[in-house]
Image (tube, rainbow, N blue to C red):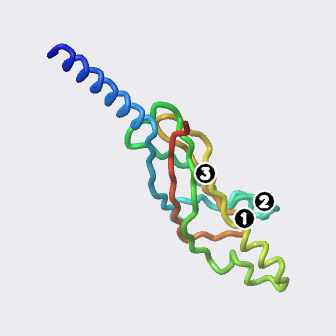
Amino acid sequence: MAQDAGAGLVQRLQALEAKVAALEERRFESGALQIYSGQIPEMLNAKCEKDLYRGIVNQRVTFSKPFPRPPKVLLALDSFAMGSESLGSQSANPQKRINEKWKLLNLAVLSVDQEGFNYRFATYCEGMLAVASGSWLALLED
C-alpha cells in the first residue's frame, strides 16, 4: 500500500512539473520606450521630399529572460511632443495642416528573436520631435 501511495505521489509531482513547464512556455513581458530629440539624427534630405524621414532611431530591447522561441511583439505610441512647425502652422491650407498632423511619426518592429527585438522610430521630414514615449508587449502564441 505504501508503494501505491508513493507511485501516486510521483505521478502527481510529474503532472505538476508538466503544468509549471506549460505555464513558463506561455509567458509575456512588457516595457517602456523613451525617445528624445537628441537621439534623432538631423534631417536626411534638406529638400523634404514626400515621405522622407527627418531622423531614424534604431534601437534594441533585450528581454529580461530569453523566450523559448521568438515571441510576437506589439508596440504602441503613448505620447509625444512636437514643435509647432511640424503641425503645419505656417500653411494657409487647412487640409494640408490636418494631413501633416497625422503623418508625423513611424514606430515599427524590425526583427524579433528569443533574446529581444529591434525597432525603428522615425519622424517624417515635416516633424520636429521633442520627446516621445511608447510601450511594448512581447508574448508567446500557442
Q: Residue furthest bottom?
A: 92
- Within 10 Å of disc 2 (Cα), the crowding (few <14, some 14-19, many 20+) is few
Task: Give the mark, 2 or 1, whose residue is nearer the N terminus.
Answer: 2
Pick the front one: 36 or 24 = 24
Count the numbered circles shown. Answer: 3
Verify CB contact (< 8 Å) between mark 3 and mark 1. Answer: no
Question: Does residue 124 lie above or below 93 as drawn?
Answer: above
What's the residue type where badge 3 is placed?
Answer: Arg
Verify CB contact (< 8 Å) between mark 2 and mark 1. Answer: yes
Task: Give the mark, 3 or 1, whose residue is nearer the N terminus.
Answer: 3
Q: Please name the residue shown 58% across and 63% down the image.
A: 77
Task: Give the mark, 3 or 2, whose residue is nearer the N terminus.
Answer: 2
Q: Can you identify the residue that label 1 sits on?
A: 125
Question: Which quarter of the rendered picture does the N terminus lie within?
Answer: top left
Q: Can you identify the residue that label 3 sits on?
A: 120
Q: Please name the residue shown 78% across and 59% down the image.
A: 51
Task: Identify the disc placed on residue 51.
Answer: 2
What's the residue type where badge 2 is placed?
Answer: Asp
What's the residue type where badge 1 is placed?
Answer: Cys
